[in-house]
Amino acid sequence: MKTISRADFGRTAQSERLRSEYRFDYSKAKPNRFVGRGSAKAVVVLLDPDVAKVFRSAESVNEALRAILAAVPRKRSRAK
């Protein structure tokens, strides 16, 4: 890597300062295909491969979790 003085640093174009692997060609960029998928209240969870084999969709995961929640007794909150 070549050393440049602080005075020359400001005059060097940004594309010359970046390594070739960091130069990004914005003309080849594509829009984000995931931007409209989730809601603001959604939580993303990564499933282990063995669990993902059983649950093929978000709906099936949510259905199983709701069944578990219905079976587990809820704690009563203390009145103050």
Image: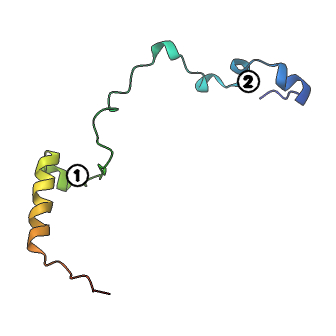
Q: Residue at x 60, y 22 (%)?
A: 23
Image coords of residue 55 (percent x, y)? 13, 50
Q: Are marks 2 and 1 in contact (CB under 8 Å)?
A: no
Front in this rendered view, residue 48 or 65: 65
Which quadrant is home to the N terminus?
top right
In the rendered image, the vertical position of residue 62 relative to residue 6, given as above or below: below
Tell whether 2 sits left or right of 79: right
Give percent across and percent down for residue 17.
73, 24
Q: Name the residue under label 2.
A: 17
Tell me the residue that label 1 is attached to.
49
Work out whether 43 lies above or below 5: below
Q: Badge 2, how many Cα within 10 Å: few under 14, some, many 20+?
A: few
Q: Residues within 10 Å of mark 1 (few under 14, many from 20)?
A: few
Residue 54 visible here: no
Please tell me whether mark 2 or mark 1 is closer to you in this view: 2
Q: Which amino acid does label 2 sit on?
A: Arg
Where does residue 3 sit, x and y in percent of width and height?
84, 29
Nearest to N terminus: mark 2 or mark 1? 2
Tell me the tag on residue 3.
none
Q: Distance between the residues labelled 2 and 1?
A: 42 Å
Secondary element type, mark 1: helix
SS for callout 2: helix
Side of 43 relative to 66 (left or right): right
| Residue 29 or residue 69, whichever sits in front | 69
Q: In this orientation, which residue lies closer to the viewer: 3 or 45?
A: 45
Considering every residue shown, the one lying at the far front of the view is 80
Q: Position of residue 78 (x, y in %)?
A: 27, 86
Residue 11: quadrant of the picture: top right
Marks counted in the figure total 2
Q: Which residue is at 84% across, 25% downward?
A: 9
Residue ranking furthest to the top: 27
Which color scheme is applied? rainbow
